[in-house]
C-alpha cells in the first residue's frame, strides 16, 4: 500500500486504495517518515486507484509536515480520476503537480 523511499527527496509511493480501511496505518507509516524531514516530498500516486476523504487527510498530514519543515510537496503520476479528486478538493493549491 505505501512504500517510503528516501534519497534526494522523500518519495511516498501510494498504491491501490487510500481510504478509511487503511488510512490509520498509512498515517502511522507516513508520520515516521516525516520525522526530521530534510528534503522535499514527492507523492507518487501512479498506482493509486482510489482515494477517499480519509485518504485526503493522510495527504494533508504530508502537506503540513512539508510546510512546517520549509519543504515542498509534489504530486506525481495521478490518473484522471484521482487527479480530479485532488483538483475538486482544492489540494492542488498547496501541492505542486509534476
Image (cartoon, rainbow, N blue to C red):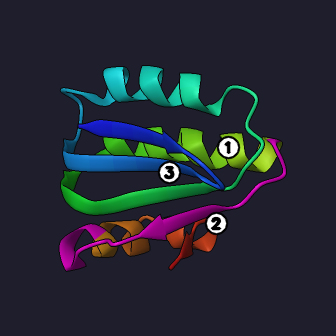
Q: Image height check: is 72 above or below 66?
A: below
* Residue 75 coordinates in the image, percent (x, y): 47, 67
Q: Is mark 1 on a helix, strand or loop?
A: helix
Q: Which of marks 2 and 1 is nearer the N terminus?
A: 1
How crowded pointer 2 is (Cα within 10 Å; few <14, some 14-19, many 20+) is rated as some
Q: Image height check: is 33 above or below 50?
A: above
Magenta span of residues: 69-82
* Residue labelled with disc 2: 94
Q: Earlier in the sequence, mark 1 or mark 3?
A: 3
* Residue labelled with disc 3: 11
Quadrant hosting residue 31? top right
Q: Image height check: is 88 above or below 43?
A: below
Q: Residue at x 36, y 29 (%)?
A: 26
Q: State left or right for residue 9 relative to residue 56.
A: right
Q: Distance between the residues labelled 1 and 3?
A: 16 Å
Q: State left or right for residue 28 relative to residue 47.
A: right
Taking the image as drawn, is residue 90 in sight?
A: no
How crowded pointer 3 is (Cα within 10 Å; few <14, some 14-19, many 20+) is rated as many
Residue 75: say if magenta. Answer: yes
Q: Which of marks 2 and 3 is in front?
A: 3
Q: Earlier in the sequence, mark 2 or mark 3?
A: 3
Q: Give residue 64's mark.
A: 1
Amino acid at each position: 500500500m505505501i512504500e517510503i523511499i528516501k534519497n534526494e527527496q522523500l518519495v511516498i509511493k501510494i498504491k491501490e486504495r487510500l481510504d478509511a480501511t487503511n488510512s490509520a496505518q498509512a498515517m502511522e507509516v507516513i508520520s515516521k517518515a516525516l520525522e526530521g524531514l530534510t528534503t522535499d516530498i514527492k507523492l507518487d500516486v501512479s498506482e493509486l486507484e482510489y482515494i477517499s476523504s480519509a485518504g485526503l487527510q493522510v495527504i494533508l498530514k504530508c502537506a503540513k509536515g512539508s510546510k512546517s519543515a520549509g519543504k515542498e510537496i509534489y504530486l506525481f503520476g495521478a490518473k484522471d480520476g484521482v487527479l480530479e479528486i485532488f483538483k475538486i478538493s482544492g489540494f492542488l493549491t498547496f501541492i505542486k503537480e509534476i
